[in-house]
Amino acid sequence: MKLLHIDSSPLGGNSVSRKLTRDIVDQWTATHAGTEVEYLDLAADAPTHLAVDSLGFRFGPSADGLTDVQRRENEVSERLVSQFLAADVVVVGAPMFNFSVPSQLKAWIDRVAQAGRTFKYTEKGPVGLAAGKTVIVASTRGGAYAGAPAMDHQESYLSTVFGFFGVTDLRFVRAEGLAMGDAAKALALAGAEEAIRTQTVAANEEVALAA
């Protein structure tokens, strides 16, 4: 089993989402022997945002005539989408920045969203090509946005994106209200840790039923 661990917060040791993704990965690997973990830190190694040289993914004969810059951008996109497709489990740290996700995470999504790799269009509409994965998102928020869909373009966006890719096993470990005082933060972290334990138990039960 391959697990892709992704962090996107630039806050380093002060990041709650990074703590939660570590805890999720630790819980997962402790209960799923032989899990191979690959780590991607988007704050340290983020792909560039899509631009004229990286917009569009061209390989094989269609790559003829590309500039050196375009070839390098294609290589980045291919590396990221191949890494995502190879993973059985993906753990994503996604703090809320201004009601959405960090731009580093958005840049990664833009590279992974490739027609013919993670989705395709048919006469009946789009079809996801990345089914069969478990995606666990560590969602952190300074305020309280559960039940406020007009302001939540973080979890709703990620649900849409991963659903578009064909992911049906999408789980959120949420810690919100982190900037609303010490008591609220402690309560949020305790709830998130309990959710991590619950997610792991649910995963173990699914594996046992499939065995």
Image (cartoon, rainbow, N blue to C red):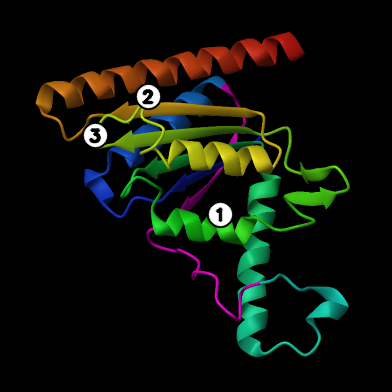
Q: Which mark is residue 143?
A: 3
First in residue order: circle 1 vs circle 2: 1
Q: Quadrant of residue 175?
A: top left
Choose between 92 and 162: the one closer to the eye: 162
Q: Is residue 106 above or below residue 99?
A: below
Labelled disc at residue 147: 2
- The segment highlighted magenta reads 32-55
Q: Given the image, on which type of amino acid does mark 3 rest?
A: Gly
Residue at 70% x, 47% y: name it. Answer: 85
Against 108, residue 182 (above or below) is above
Say which of marks 3 and 2 sits in front: 2
Rounded to the nearest angstrom, the CA distance separating label 1 from label 2 is 25 Å
- Image quadrant occupied by the N terminus: top right
Residue 164, position in %: x, y?
67, 42
- Answer with left or right where residue 130 lies relative to residue 142: right
- Per the image, the residue denoted by label 1 is 109
Quadrant hosting residue 204: top right
Asked which secondary structure carries label 1, the reply is: helix
**Residue 156 coordinates in the image, percent (x, y):** 49, 37
In contact (CB < 8 Å): disc 3 and disc 2: no
Whole-angstrom CA distance, mark 1 to mark 3, is 25 Å
